[in-house]
């Protein structure tokens, strides 16, 4: 039998049993090693915007137990993403692959939180990346979210010596830090929690301030010769964080919306946007070509992202993991095949 973590009712996940998926031509079957809990998973469980039931889990690392393709063999350890576009679609050819209906309608079955996961034939050539032997399982789960960050930065124009401000230094906000560090961009962070500021400094942030300090705008301008940030990355969108972004970004700079919630309507002064030539950029998900690029980074020095994992739960204790992640007072939470999936390779 296959144990599957599902969300059938609001504010709760539950473990159900079903037959192990039977695979067809071009498909593979994975045995779960570990799967990270994403902010999207939290929203699907706790936000009434999402009708139940909901399929959850996509930051996945597993081992191949069955294969009906010559591309990947049994026993291989792989990281897997959950969406792939039609490569010939209007959206894909114009750089908007995540907007392709085929992209949003594709997925792994029955989701990443299960003993066994089927990867359909339309995903196999695009979303599966072998995990190098030296890369720990708890680092490899970051392939898909790191690829999302890569795509976001690819949509921008940044230069060495630029200044960036990250608003919201949770697990995803931290992922931007090594990328911006490697791009020689001076990065500041702000968050509600001091421990996240401290962690961000360890990952290369030049400066950090809690919301309570109420001086991140001033510090950002000091660090940029009075101009303000060339880029503000909004990992959390509220009226307060948007105000911070608008006050901190330089004239002609860019605000990147990287995280939001459903029904998040906020008033904005479009006159100010227009007269200051503020660029508003959004970025949703990642494209298949970025998965190998993300894994290459995870294979290199300076990307020991397993250190961001604060809690790990087996499938039968996953509800506790979701509750902790929903509270927002932890680092990265992972659901695994057993309690002791190692952070070592």
Image (cartoon, rainbow, N blue to C red):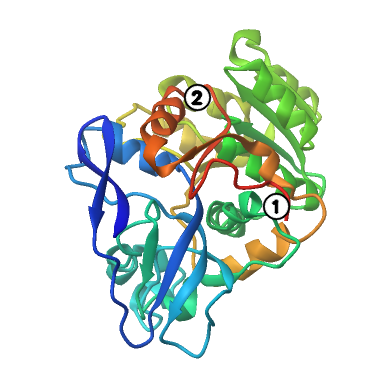
- Residue 313 point in image, percent of width and height: 49, 37
Relative to residue 8, is residue 164 drawn left or right? right
Question: Residue 99: x percent and y percent?
Answer: 35, 63
Between 102 and 298, the one lying in front of the other is 298
Q: Nearer the viewer, residue 211 or 303?
A: 303
At 80% from the left edge and 31% from the top edge, which residue is drawn?
Answer: 206
Locate residue 177, reporting x and y percent: 71, 42
Q: Is residue 292 visible?
A: yes
Q: Name the residue nearer the viewer: 114 or 165.
A: 114
Counting from the top left corner in percent of width and height, residue 192 is at: 57, 17
Residue marked by disc 2: 241
Q: Nearer the viewer, residue 294 or 72?
A: 72
Q: Residue at x 38, y 39 (%)?
A: 316
Quarter of the view holding residue 290:
bottom right
Q: Earlier in the sequence, mark 2 or mark 1?
A: 1
Q: Is residue 230 visible?
A: no
In this rendering, the answer to whether 212 lies above or below 256 is above
* Residue farthest along the front direction in this orientation: 1
210 w.r.t. 29: above or below: above
Q: How crowded is the residue under tag 2: few (<14 C-alpha within 10 Å), some, or many (20+)?
A: some
| Image quadrant occupied by the C terminus | bottom right
Q: Dot 1 lies on which element? A: loop
**Helix, strand or loop status at disc 2:** helix
Judge left or right: residue 208 versus residue 138. right
Tag on residue 158? 1
Disc 2 and disc 1 in contact, CB within 8 angstroms: no
Residue at (69, 18) in percent of width and height: 209
Asked whether, in this view, residue 172 is left or right of residue 91, the answer is: right
Residue under the point 77% across and 45% down: 185
The image quadrant where one finds the N terminus is: bottom left
Seen in the picture, residue 135 relative to 329 is either above or below; the reply is below
């Amino acid at each position: 039998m296959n144990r599957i973590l599902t969300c059938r009712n609001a504010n709760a996940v539950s473990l159900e049993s079903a037959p192990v998926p039977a695979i067809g031509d071009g498909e593979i079957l994975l045995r779960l090693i570990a799967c990270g809990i994403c902010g999207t998973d939290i929203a699907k469980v706790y936000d009434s915007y999402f009708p139940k039931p909901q399929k959850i889990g996509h930051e996945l690392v597993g081992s191949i137990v069955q294969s009906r393709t010559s591309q990947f063999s049994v026993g291989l350890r792989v990281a897997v993403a959950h969406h792939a576009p039609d490569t010939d679609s209007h959206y894909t050819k114009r750089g908007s692959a995540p907007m392709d209906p085929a992209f949003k309608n594709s997925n792994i079955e029955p989701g990443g939180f299960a003993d066994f996961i089927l990867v359909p034939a339309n995903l196999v050539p695009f979303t599966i990346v072998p995990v190098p032997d030296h890369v720990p399982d708890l680092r490899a789960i970051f392939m898909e979210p790191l690829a999302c960050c890569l795509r976001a930065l690819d949509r921008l124009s940044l230069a060495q010596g630029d200044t960036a401000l990250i608003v919201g230094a949770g697990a995803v906000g931290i992922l931007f830090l090594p990328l911006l560090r490697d791009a020689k961009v001076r990065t500041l962070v702000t968050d509600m929690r001091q421990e996240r500021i401290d962690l961000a400094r360890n990952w290369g942030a030049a400066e950090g301030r809690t919301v309570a300090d109420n001086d991140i705008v001033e510090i950002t301008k000091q660090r940029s010769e009075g101009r303000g940030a060339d880029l503000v990355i909004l990992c959390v969108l509220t009226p307060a964080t948007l105000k911070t972004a608008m006050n901190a970004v330089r004239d002609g700079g860019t605000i990147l919306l990287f995280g939001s919630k459903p029904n998040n309507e906020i008033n904005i002064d479009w006159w100010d946007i227009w007269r200051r030539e503020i660029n508003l950029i959004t970025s949703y998900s990642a494209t298949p070509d970025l998965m190998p690029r993300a894994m290459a980074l995870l294979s290199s020095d300076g990307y020991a992202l397993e250190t961001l994992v604060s809690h790990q739960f087996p499938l039968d204790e996953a509800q506790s993991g979701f509750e902790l992640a929903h509270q927002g007072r932890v680092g990265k939470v992972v659901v695994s095949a057993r309690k002791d999936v190692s952070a070592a390779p």
